[in-house]
Image: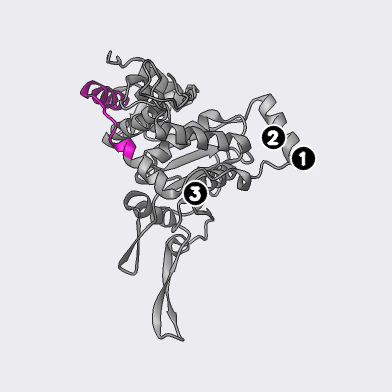
Amino acid sequence: MNENEDIHSETTENTNRTSLGAPPAEDPVKALMNQIRHELRRVFFGQDRVVDQVLATFLAGGHVLLEGKPGLGKTHLVVALANTFGGEFNRIQFTPDLMPSDVTGFTLYDMQSQTFQVKKGPVFTNLLLADEINRAPAKTQAALLEVMQEQQVTIDGTSHELASPFMTLATQNPIEQEGTYPLPEAQLDRFLMKVVIDYPENADETTVVNQVTSGNGLDPSEVATVCDPQTIVEAQRRVSTIRCVEEVVQYAVNIARATRNAQGISLGAGTRGAISLIKVGKAIAVMSGRDFVTPDDVKYAAVPVLRHRIQLAPELAISGQNVDDALAAIIAGVEAPRV
């Protein structure tokens, strides 16, 4: 399985398991993800790989950095995902004048009650879309660090926990660099995956244009709510219990370590990169209906999990090779275990 393949699943009919030779009932988390995937694909055409990777990150309890040109439906996807589980959604448009308190919230003195009142910021939600995150200065970007890592916000010395589930989906435009502030390594490392959204195929793009211009919409509010937030939290707990044998863990570590020694790589992935590979591998296993991680799960996750954790040396960047090409070569050189 490679980064360009989708996580395919087949729906198994839920028959009486006591019958001789009857197939087992479909895993409930796999069935849930299939339902959510089906609803998202109703309004988000031609991006099946993106949908699968975002769902895997969501199941793993991580955060996503979405990179793609404007007009490819990034906001559309996040709103639709929130509606599938009845979750709350907030959007922050990052700009150079955005302050940290605009993200997290602040305290305000109420003259009527003669007390300080906490005004919670937009991070108090289930899905947070941080749009064009690299347009805000580092101080404002850093305001998301505690939120993403600890799932809490400290306002004037008091910590406030966020509701579960919580996921940040930050977007950045790979083309426009004028007036932007590159994300520091500490911020980038907080994202479990960097998902690249490319242009859809001709047929899918034609469908989108026809649907929108005919007045039929592709309205994300029309997707069905298939579960509640607590069901998502329980699914995330299930992912953490998935088995991963020592050989597969070592495979993930070997891939991360190989990025540090590869020619043309000036900065390799840290230990968090290997941890992230296993986390996403477990989510992929659940979405595939398995209770164990395979080397293919780790291999599938490797490019989107590691592409934002490594840096190319200048000589390799000048040659025209990109990060994904370099990672593909590194992964191909790491022997996978036979388990």
Crowding near pointer 1: few (<14 within 10 Å), some, many (20+)?
A: few
Can I make out residue 50 in this image? yes
- CA distance separating discs 1 and 3: 30 Å
Q: How is the image coloured?
A: one colour
Which residue appears farthest toward the front when viewing the image? 19
Instruction: Say which element carries label 2.
Output: helix
Crowding near pointer 2: few (<14 within 10 Å), some, many (20+)?
A: some
Q: Nearer the viewer, mark 3 or mark 2?
A: 2
Q: Which residue is mark 1?
A: 213
- What amino acid type should be assigned to the residue bearing mark 1? Thr
**Depth check: 319 or 2 in front?**
2
- What amino acid type should be assigned to the residue bearing mark 3? Ile
**Depth check: 108 or 96 in front?**
108
**Depth check: 96 or 128 in front?**
128
Image position, residue 146 (x, y; %): 34, 54
- Secondary structure mainly formed by the magenta segment: helix
Contact flag, marks 1 and 3 (Cβ < 8 Å): no
**Residue 327: which disc?**
none
Q: Classify residue 161 as left or right of residue 83.
A: left
Earlier sequence position, callout 3 versus callout 2: 3
Instruction: Say which element carries label 3.
Output: helix
Q: Which residue is mark 3?
A: 133
**Residue 208: which disc?**
2
- CA distance separating discs 2 and 1: 8 Å
In the rendered image, the quadrant that contains the N terminus is top left
- What amino acid type should be assigned to the residue bearing mark 2? Val
Image position, residue 288 (x, y; %): 41, 26
Q: Magenta part of the protein: which range?
A: 238-260
Earlier sequence position, callout 2 versus callout 1: 2
